Amino acid sequence: MTYSADIKKLTRSFLPDNFTVIDWNSVEPYFKALVDRDISTLEKLEQWLKDQSELEAAVSEDACWRQIKMTCDTQNKELEESFNFFCLHIQPNIQPYADTLNKKLISSPLLNDLQKETYFTYIRNVKKSIELFREENIPLQAEISVLQQQYGQITGAMTVDVNGEQYTLQQAAKFLENSDRNIRESVYHKIQQRRLQDRESLNNLFDKLIDIRNAESKNAGFDNYRDYRFKELGRFDYTHEDCLQFHEAVKLHVLPLVNEIYKRKKEKLGVETLRPWDLEAEPAGTEPLHPFKTGNELLEKSIDCFNKLSPFFGECLSKMRELKHLDLESRKGKAPGGYNCPLAESGAPFIFMNAAGQMHDVTTMVHEGGHAVHSFLAHHLTLSGFKEYPMEIAEVASMSMELFSMDYWDSFFVNETDLQRAKEHQLERVITIFPWIAVIDKFQHWLYLNPNHTHEERQQNWLSILEEFKDNVIDYSGLENYRGNAWQRQLHLFEVPFYYIEYGIAQLGAIGMWMQFKKDKKAALENYCKALSLGGTKTLPELYKTAGLSFDFSPDTIKKLMDFVKSEMEK
């Protein structure tokens, strides 16, 4: 099948071409019109769904741009106020209308006449939304939206002084690759001490988030926020027991490989003890990898890499460049992290990241590029709701792209030795990320099953879970204060609770895709594109099946996939 990145903004038929979200009065008439509309024939019902989708896309894109602009410049008060205005004065007014429209659909006598295969997951999600909706949760959700953004404001302002110059924490991390161990250790301490300065404010912010999330779940009739959130995230195909089984499998089948990787690192560096500031370093005399210098160069090389893998993938990034839908370089006042933000009406998404010239940035870029390709592939689907795909398949899109693209990383590394080092770095990361995923996920289960905990109990339980998944090579002695605070660097805990196990599930799917790719590149890429172009119109197991995968993260599967990665590393 041929795919095209020549994406077009959706044509409006329900909204005027000049419609923009100014305030609630500018939006409400369109929701009212949908509530009052006659949907007594199948043709009218389907047109009503399309018009509803058109309104959702326009409003959603407006909200996305407010968030994008604010994360690009967290110090601009106008951008912050614009985002908060949407959260406090527009979104809360939409929710009751959305619930009314959902109920109007579900109560329609024609519901069963909609194509069962196409609408099954859509209707399932609508029913889930009706089940969870509570009027009293609207102000709580508005407050959460505003509070979550404070994490980016606090962490975006963090900088450290190295050799008389100010660096964001992302930029400072490049010194952890320096061959001079004293420099690495010094900068490591500076970064950690800077984080500790805001420990109390982040703890207090997190307290508020836990309290509100807990109240939200109680209002909806749930015993705890974990069970509420599993339902809200649409986890129809696995349970929290499956997550606990995943944690145990990581201990059993992944930690031994992690130990091997760190033992090799220790031998390679020739150090008596391996310390946390040694993990990104190379032996003395070996230059750190320098894949690019500027954000523009990163983009150029990424487009070249994607073009070699599949011209369609390269076209997606080129289209985003043409539309200026990228902000790649780290700078002071920019929120931390990286994301791909789908834009429901425009179609071409926006990539945000904090590049500082490191190998890690290449991985982030191709990862977010995988998400972007997913957005392009799903844009043709008729309804916005069809494009709301499960996060577990979204992360297969991004993590598979990391592995697929490795064969074409000569775009970043002309030197064969550097290219081999980059691939080795990537495969090590594929394995070493699993314990951290298990730690973050297990910690969240504890947090929300024990919502009334103290700061001290939070730290004790964090350290206890961290200890469970600790390798037996790295020496953490004397760093207990930093270790106890390490959870605060994970933005997902603040901004997207319980969204982290997806990375583990998807990493397994990505390794499965890579196994296919190694056998037959053309077939693997076709399976990949075919699955992603279905958006959210199929269940998670069906999407995996279309991709040529089995939706299975049992201990046996984890062992088999880890053995495969290990064999590839040994090659």
Image (spheres, grey):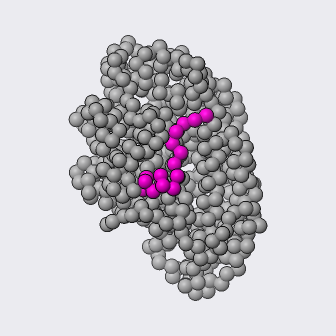
State yes or no: residue 324 in magenta.
yes
Q: Residue 3, percent across and down?
A: 36, 64
Q: Residue at x 43, y 45 (%)?
A: 299
Q: Residue at x 37, y 29 (%)?
A: 289
Does residue 79 lie above or below 545 as drawn?
A: above
Q: Quadrant of the C terminus?
A: top left
Nearer to the camera, 380 or 439: 380
Relative side of 71 to 117, left or right: right
Relative side of 505 to 105, left or right: left
Q: How many numbered marks, from 0 up? A: 0
Does residue 227 lie above or below 35 as drawn?
A: above
Q: Residue 344, percent across and down?
A: 55, 62
State yes or no: residue 190 in magenta.
no
Rendering quarter of residue 455:
top right
Q: Residue 70, percent across and down?
A: 65, 46
Extent of the magenta region:
316-332
Rendering quarter of residue 525:
bottom left
Nearer to the camera, 288 or 512: 288
Nearer to the camera, 149 or 327: 327
Q: Quadrant of the N terminus?
A: bottom left
Q: Residue at x 46, y 48 (%)?
A: 368
Observer able to see residue 151: no
Observer able to see residue 527: yes
Q: Residue 247, percent across and down?
A: 45, 40
Q: Residue at x 55, y 18 (%)?
A: 163
Relative side of 329 to 303, left or right: right
Relative side of 201 to 113, left or right: right
